[in-house]
């Protein structure tokens, strides 16, 4: 597995403020992303949530590292119980005309090499593409 980060870019026909709410407002996140109990976009806060996929349950834990309203959200992304590895996700928002460019950067997925086949870089790329191309796009533009 290479050590290059995953970088996915999408442009949405929605203002930056709407995209920011989709990424940081708990109720809006539940509509398109995951139900993250008690979520608040505040540096130092930690959260846990579970995702079922293909009959498997994946536990996620993350800590908010950086919040720049309407510009950047950065947090850790770990899988306790599956791996001791740690990765970092950065969501960057930029106005583009009347829309918003979202760049997702996932660094450190190679740190999950101890977690098995479900945690490959290819699986992360597939998952993040689906989340950005379908889930978030349908929420913002649907």
Image (spheres, grey):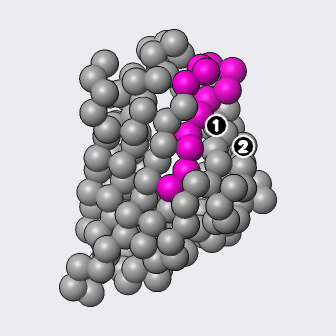
Q: Quadrant of residue 137?
A: bottom left
Quarter of the picture holding the N terminus: top left
Vertical placement of residue 14 versus 44, above or below: below
SS of the residue at dot 2?
Answer: strand
Q: Residue at x 46, y 47 (%)?
A: 89
Q: Position of residue 135 (x, y in %)?
A: 44, 57
- Residue at the far left: name it: 97
Q: Nearer the viewer, residue 22 or 1?
A: 1
Query: Mark 1, residues whose alpha carbon is within 10 Å: few (<14), some, or many (≥20)?
Result: some
* Image x and y of residue 105, in percent: 36, 49
* Label 2 or label 1, whichever comes before in sequence order: 2
Residue placed under numbered mark 1 in the picture: 60
Residue 52 seen in this snapshot: no
Q: How far across and down, in percent of the image, does residue 27 sit?
A: 67, 69
Q: Please name the residue shown 63% across and 44% down the image.
A: 62
State which region is magenta: 74-85
- Residue 66 visible in image: yes
* Left or right side of 4 for 31: right
Callout 1 secondary element: strand
Quarter where residue 142 is shown: bottom left
Please identify the residue farthest to the bottom as the structure is shown.
98
Q: Is residue 84 magenta?
A: yes
Residue at position x 42%, y 72% in the image: 71
Label ID, residue 48: 2
Q: Is residue 42 above or below residue 117?
A: below
As rendered, which of 68 and 26 lies closer to the eye?
A: 68
Q: How many marks?
A: 2
Q: Residue at x 36, y 53 (%)?
A: 104
Decide: marks 2, 1 in contact (CB < 8 A)? Answer: yes
Give how far apart the Cα atoms at labels 2 and 1 are: 6 Å
């Amino acid at each position: 597995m290479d050590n290059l980060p995953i970088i996915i870019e999408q442009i949405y026909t929605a203002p930056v403020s709407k995209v920011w709410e989709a990424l940081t407002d708990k109720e809006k996140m539940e509509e398109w992303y995951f139900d993250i109990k008690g979520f608040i976009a505040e540096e130092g806060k930690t959260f846990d949530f579970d995702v079922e996929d293909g009959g498997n349950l994946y536990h996620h834990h993350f800590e908010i590292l950086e919040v720049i309203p309407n510009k950047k959200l950065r947090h850790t992304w770990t899988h306790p119980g599956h791996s001791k590895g740690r990765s970092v996700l950065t969501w960057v928002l930029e106005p583009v005309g009347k829309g918003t460019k979202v760049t997702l950067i996932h660094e450190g997925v190679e740190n999950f090499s101890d977690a098995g086949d479900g945690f490959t870089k290819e699986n992360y790329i597939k998952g993040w593409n689906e989340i950005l191309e379908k889930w978030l796009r349908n929420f913002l533009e649907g």
